[in-house]
Image (tube, rainbow, N blue to C red):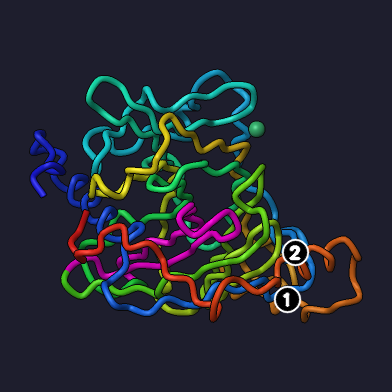
């Protein structure tokens, strides 16, 4: 994987982290069964406020450039078949745009992260975004640990939490989630989770993670789709928005360049202090009210639409962007 080696030795640790991130993001162990695509497990939309959270950090991208207090272009340099470049990151008209574009012989990719600027553990992390149009490349909103390659216990070394990845190969109605930890020969994963929401690949939608000491919960448009308890990180991590690309040329043969991942905002919420008998901000999440079906008719209608069965037996195989199992 010489393509990923950093020419600057002083940055070798960071390079290792980026390299390892590529191992995890979008990558699944060969032959590992995927979870079936499923509709939401909540009948109505949930808001972070209703779950006891309050806003602590946000970027609405209202300026004309990336806010250097909040973000930096992440991982400038080669990344699989592409090259992460500040040229592929633009801000304007209230949006962050992460492009995938061809320039000379390179495919430039946009990627930004809050590393060295904003790190936290637990909370509710949400972005509102319009996903890319093409297969091959994919939009990703994820959370990463700076320690993940240093050990295997996610509680101590953290986890890669893929809040949203959009593989157009699966159609316009499915987004994927995953958690990876223990980068290295014994890397672990929750296995890919596929959320089915009709039309999620068109227009703007919200994608969110609730991360508590007990679980990760994944949301799309406020609907709760999956909860997992494995791979729980108990350390501070940082957020990433990126346009990703696989490592094999044949996997981008249908990709139409340029393409773009448009982000309207990113918001981070923390548990309200003093809520429910003075629980501290890091206290376990309160049990949410059970899903009920007597709420807003509009919400119910959308859930019904979202629960339309998908093709075949309901099992969607995640694209094997690294089908040889090798790290990208
Ligand atoms: Ca905005």
Ligand 1 has an atom within 8 Å of the beta carbon of the residue at disc 1 = no
Task: Give the answer, above or below, for where 131 lies relative to 8.
Answer: below
Residue 142 magenta? no
Is 102 on the left or on the right of 203, as rendered? left
Q: Quadrant of residue 210?
A: bottom right
Quadrant location of ligand 1?
A: top right
Give whichever of 24, 100 is nearer the camera.
100
Is 34 on the left or on the right of 6, as rendered? right
Marks 2 & 1, CB-CB < 8 Å contact:
yes
Q: Quadrant of residue 275?
A: bottom right
The residue at 54%/77% (across/down) is 312
Report x, y in % for residue 166. Answer: 49, 53
Report x, y in % for residue 123. Answer: 57, 60
Provide the residue span drawn in magenta.
156-184
Q: Which residue is mark 2?
A: 46
Q: Which residue is mark 1?
A: 288
Residue 173 magenta? yes
Report x, y in % for residue 102. Answer: 33, 26
The residue at 51%/41% (across/down) is 132
* SS type, badge 2: loop
Which of marks 1 and 2 precedes in the sequence? 2
């Amino acid at each position: 994987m010489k393509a990923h080696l950093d020419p600057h030795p002083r940055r070798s640790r960071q390079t290792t982290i980026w390299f390892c991130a590529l191992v995890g993001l979008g990558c699944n162990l060969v032959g590992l069964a995927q979870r079936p695509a499923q509709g939401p497990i909540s009948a109505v939309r949930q808001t972070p406020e209703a779950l006891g959270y309050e806003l602590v950090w946000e970027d609405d991208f209202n300026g004309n450039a990336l806010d250097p207090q909040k973000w930096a272009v992440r991982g400038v340099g080669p990344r699989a078949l592409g090259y992460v470049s500040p040229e592929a990151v633009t801000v304007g008209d209230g949006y962050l745009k992460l492009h995938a574009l061809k320039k000379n012989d390179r495919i430039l990719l946009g990627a930004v992260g809050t590393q060295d600027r904003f790190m936290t553990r637990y909370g509710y992390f949400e972005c509102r975004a319009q996903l890319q149009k093409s297969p091959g490349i994919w939009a990703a909103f994820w959370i990463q640990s700076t320690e993940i390659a240093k050990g295997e216990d996610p509680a101590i070394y953290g986890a890669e939490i893929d809040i949203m990845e959009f593989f157009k190969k699966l159609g316009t109605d499915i987004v994927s989630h995953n958690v990876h930890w223990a980068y290295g020969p014994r890397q672990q994963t929750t296995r890919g989770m596929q959320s089915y929401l009709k039309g999620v690949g068109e227009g703007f939608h919200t994608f969110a993670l609730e991360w508590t000491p007990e679980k990760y919960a994944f949301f799309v448009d406020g609907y709760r789709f999956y909860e997992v308890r494995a791979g729980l990180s108990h350390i501070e991590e940082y957020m990433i928005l990126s346009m990703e690309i696989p490592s094999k040329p044949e996997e981008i043969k249908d990709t139409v360049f340029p393409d773009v991942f448009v982000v309207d905002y990113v918001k981070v919420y923390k548990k309200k202090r003093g809520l429910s008998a003075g629980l501290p901000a890091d206290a376990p999440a309160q049990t949410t009210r059970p899903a009920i079906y007597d709420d807003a008719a509009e919400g119910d209608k959308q859930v019904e639409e979202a629960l339309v069965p998908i093709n075949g037996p309901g099992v969607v195989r995640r694209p094997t962007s690294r089908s040889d199992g090798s790290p990208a």
